[in-house]
Amino acid sequence: MFIRILFVFLLAASCSTAAENLALFVEKCAICHGNEATGTDRGPPLANSRRLRGRAVAEIANVIRKGTTGGMPPVPLPDDQVDQLSALVHSMNITAFEAAPVGDLAAGEAFFFGKGDCASCHIAAGRGSGTGPDLSSAGRQLTLAELTQSLAEPSARLTPGYGRVTVTLKSGAELKGYARNRGSHDLQLQTPEGKVHFLTEAEYTRVAPEPGSPMKPLVASHADRANLIAWLSRQTGETKGPIAAAPADPAEFEAILHPKPGDWPTYQGNLSGNRYSPLDQINQSNVGRLQLQWVYPMAYQPLETTPLVVDGMMFVSAPNQVCALDARSGREIWKYTRPRSSTGTVSGDAALGANRGAALSGDRVFFTTDNCHMICLHRLTGALLWEVEMPETSNRHYGATGAPLVVNDLVIGGVGGGDGGIRGFIAAYKITTGELAWRFWTVPKPGEPGSETWQGDAIAVGGAATWLTGTYDPETGLLYWPTGNPFPDTDGTDRGGTNLYTNCDLALDPKTGQLKWHFQFTPHDLHDWDANQPPVLVNAKFQGRDRKLLLHANRNGFFYVLDRVTGEFLLGKPFVRRLTWASGVDALGVPILTPNNVTTPGGVLTCPAVRGATNWFSTAYNPRTNLYYVMSVEDCTIYQQAKMGGYSAPNDPNNPAMRYLRAIDIETGDIRWEIEQVGPVETTVVAGNYSGVLATAANLVFYGEASGGFAAVDAASGKTLWHFAAGTVQWKASPMTYRVNGRQYVSIASGANILSFALPAE
């Protein structure tokens, strides 16, 4: 029937052409897909298929020619027949956007947000309420017939995830709402006001489906209906630039500053950057009973994301995708995805797929795409609210991999690409609109303060990337952000001087982006030792005096303690043994260089290695032990003077690279204990085992072992108390912990999976 109806509407083609195409389809395709293209047990439906909707004719033709992995075999047909069939299949799935119904778009938008009252439940064009299904992409997701029917007969077209149910709890009380998802032993229920209840079978006795839709059939004039349909047909899930919105609610930032017990609302769990949790239900006496509770797979590996958890909902990311999960069961609530950028349009870690996480504020979820766009989604639906391109000018070396940071009413992010030639910056946007609030350039223009530290032409694309998440201190009112290496990495010929503001920690006014102070760890860096490691903020007694401190284990091999109010240097001491480029640091923290470590075309062996004595993975400080925990690397690299690259590994089997989990006394810089990481060198160092750490108030430290396990150790002694054989070949993520319904969980991204652990249920 669908094919017969379709035939009537193929107005762009002649009747004879349409008949020929249909006859060809029946001859070549019907044996698997049915005469009506509705599918058989041998092949999926091709008519009215959401899988094919939005695909170009050329994409469909490519599938016909090449087949699919593990599915449809290639079909050997002449090009003209492939063209006929792909055009026909495309026409079977034409979207409302492609149909382009006639109507007054401005009037349709006014109706949606005005007398039609559609926005009281739905989001479109970045505005509205997320309590009902998202209509941001209605034009691309629905056919014109489906869109029209959804308005006229809502109960005939129920959106997946919005079936109504009544849940009877063990207490006898009832909850009514949408079953956003459901398993055999759990239910994710959204009530009409937008609250999501994450329930297990131990908490309810009955789930009763309710018929129909709460949405009433549209009552509107013919003109209003036509205008609304025309406007909805143009909704493609895209927004360009800032949008109009009300100011942010200050209570949203208060929930980040002072999160509810058990929530993990930011990349490091708190704005200080110290991955130390007050949760102590999992402790030294019971951690040995920790068990895996659930696994959530994602279509990318190795994942680098840190999960966020607020009100029982978890948010995880991968390149160009964000997923919302039930933090108790790992069951998916929604997923937002977009295609990764094509080869050659981005470079570096962004092109490889690195993405380290998202940020939250109220009902908004923020993340950055591989091609350096800042994205804002709705917490309940994943609807796109706004999107802005971060760089001012096009440069394929710009990318983004880090989790944004929310401070007050701004969301702040940095950029990658420093190894390819960019001018780094930090940018802040209004969380409600996406409007740019300020931008701080980490490489000054000629004539600006700091430009005198550059002699030569390299200042134009001098690097200083900002791809790691910064930290914020409400006590000083300052934002702290690390910066990357200068470019070219190993050739300083065209960049004489110290090259500010590369390899720095910056202290900025978060309201304006004005620089308050800076500290440069490696002036005129020739070894790619960027400072993109977590700047951890703690209040502690230091050498007999209460101080506001910034702790930073740097890629150059030194552990630093700074006064975070003024930037004053307090301590700098090596935390690795293989350190040849400097004999120490002076009273101001400036490195005391050793001879014969300047790069040459032939190469110079220098330690630490190019990956650094540590890297971007998380660190933690425990105020009870006064110890700072960091994964460290003992290794060296042969550095060649080169415009691009310039690194090679030494072939010295007598001095293999080693990795250690180390605990450092922050007052002296002494290493209190260390755990040697056992595992193949090529996976632990050369390929990178980038596991960060998590410290808890129960005096536990969690981390990923180089041998593939996930472990918990005594924070004071380093004694291993528990481990789980995760089989992870390459850890590239940092653990976190959260609590839901009184139960503490520990979670980490492992390979392509999110793992979550807890003690056995009582």
Image (cartoon, rainbow, N blue to C red):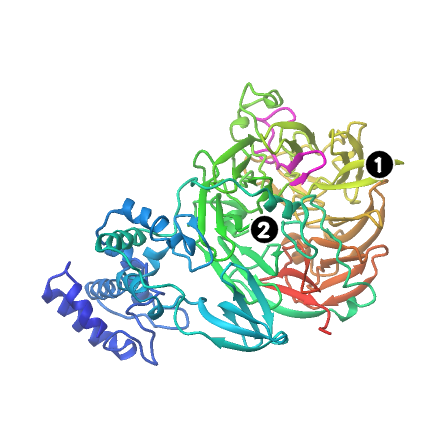
Which residue shows up at 44% across the image and 51% down it?
384
Specify few, some or many for label 1: CA neighbours under 10 Å numbering under 14, 14-19, or 20 or more: few
| The quarter of the displayed image where residue 280 is located | bottom right
Which is more toward the observer, 4 or 302?
4
- In 3D space, how far apart are the residues under numbered discs 1 and 2 (Cα atoms)? 34 Å
For badge 2, the amino acid type reads Arg
- Is 741 on the left-hand or right-hand side of 286? left
Q: Which of marks 1 and 2 is in front?
A: 1
Which residue shows up at 53% across the image and 50% down it?
365
| The quarter of the displayed image where residue 153 is located | bottom left
Residue 560 horizontal/vertical position (percent): 77, 37
| The quarter of the displayed image where residue 326 is located | bottom right
Can you say whether 338 is above or below 579 in the image? below
- Is 717 on the left-hand or right-hand side of 236? right
- Most frequent secondary structure within the magenta stretch: loop
In the picture of the structure, the residue carrying the numbered disc 1 is 546
- Res. 136 in view: no
Split into 4 quadrants, where in the image is the C terminus? bottom right
User: Residue pushed farthest top?
Assistant: 447
Task: Report the span colored magenta.
Answer: 471-498
Residue 546 horizontal/vertical position (percent): 84, 36
For badge 1, the amino acid type reads Asp
Residue 220 horizontal/vertical position (percent): 27, 56
In the picture of the structure, the residue carrying the numbered disc 2 is 356
Q: How many marks?
A: 2
- Is 95 on the left-hand or right-hand side of 615? left
Mark 1 or 2 closer to N-term? 2
User: Residue pushed farthest bottom?
Assistant: 41
Residue 268: which numbered mark, if any? none
